[in-house]
Image (cartoon, grey):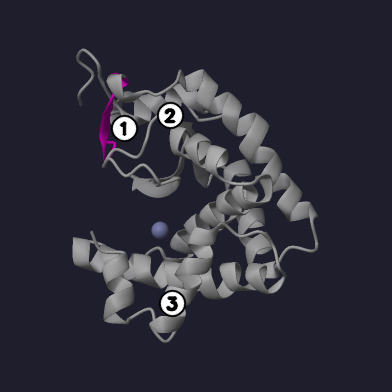
């Protein structure tokens, strides 16, 4: 465990940001899959929480109530809220960018010991909010959360133990996201961010095949 000086584990961060997280025992502290530095905090942890409360969470609740949204999207958002509520999923809005330096990663599911965490990288979300219309930003967030539920659905079904295998799993998850969520939104003329329209076109070019080399390449870094 590293908690010397400015280094803290992601689990400590969760303790600070998630109100209803059960108290961690000494034993399972410090098992986070990535370490972050307080120096990476772009805002106070409380501000990240607040941003989630005020901006992100209402979008999720509204989506579940809005029967005009595609079923594949609503079902996933409903699932994410249910899992957070019954503690199968620990939701953690964090005040950092995703640690690999990618500024555009909004969310990520991580399995840490027996628990599953859903991280929202608030600084990245806030940046995107500035560059998109209100409706586009809403669908960015909804698609991101629904995409993470697809990863949860896929848990244990595919190998993710190497970068190559993880890339294949990501390719399958994004293929599903395009077919079951992005395209139904586009068909309904919803304001999907241009990036996702582009993604849908790329998947069509790959003949809608998640196993296509060119498609997998997009998701392997
Ligand atoms: Zn993914």
The label nearer to you, 2 versus 3, is 3
Quadrant containing the C terminus is bottom left
Q: Which mark is residue 151?
A: none
Q: x, y percentage for residue 114? A: 37, 46
Q: Is residue 86 magenta-colored?
A: no
Q: Which mark is residue 14?
A: 2
Task: First in sequence, mark 2 or 3: give its number.
Answer: 2
Q: Secondary structure at mark 1?
A: helix
Residue range (magenta): 31-38
Q: CA distance from mark 2 to mark 3?
A: 35 Å
Q: x, y percentage for residue 115? A: 41, 44
Dot 3 alpha-carbon crowd within 10 angstroms: few under 14, some 14 to 19, many 20 or more? many
Dot 1 alpha-carbon crowd within 10 angstroms: few under 14, some 14 to 19, many 20 or more? few
Mark 3 lies on residue: 203
Task: First in sequence, mark 2 or 1: give its number.
Answer: 2
Q: Residue at x 72, y 53 (%)?
A: 63
């Amino acid at each position: 465990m590293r908690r010397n000086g400015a280094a803290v584990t992601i689990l400590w961060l969760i303790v600070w940001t998630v109100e209803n997280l059960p108290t961690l025992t000494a034993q399972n502290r410090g098992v986070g899959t990535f370490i972050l530095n307080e120096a990476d905090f772009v805002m106070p942890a409380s501000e990240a929480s607040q941003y989630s409360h005020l901006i992100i969470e209402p979008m999720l609740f509204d989506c579940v109530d809005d029967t005009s949204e595609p079923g594949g999207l609503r079902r996933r958002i409903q699932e994410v809220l249910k899992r957070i509520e019954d503690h199968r999923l620990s939701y953690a809005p964090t005040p950092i960018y995703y640690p690999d330096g990618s500024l555009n990663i909004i969310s990520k599911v991580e399995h840490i010991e027996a628990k599953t965490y859903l991280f929202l990288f608030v600084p990245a979300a806030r940046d995107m909010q500035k560059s998109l219309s209100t409706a586009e930003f809403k669908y960015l967030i909804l698609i991101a959360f629904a995409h993470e539920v697809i990863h949860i659905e896929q848990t244990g079904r595919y190998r993710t133990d190497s970068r190559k295998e993880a890339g294949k799993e990501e390719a399958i998850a994004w293929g599903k996201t395009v077919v079951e969520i992005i395209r139904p939104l586009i068909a309904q003329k919803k304001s999907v961010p241009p990036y996702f329209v582009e993604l849908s076109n790329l998947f069509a070019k790959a003949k809608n095949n998640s196993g296509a080399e060119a498609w997998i390449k997009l998701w392997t870094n």
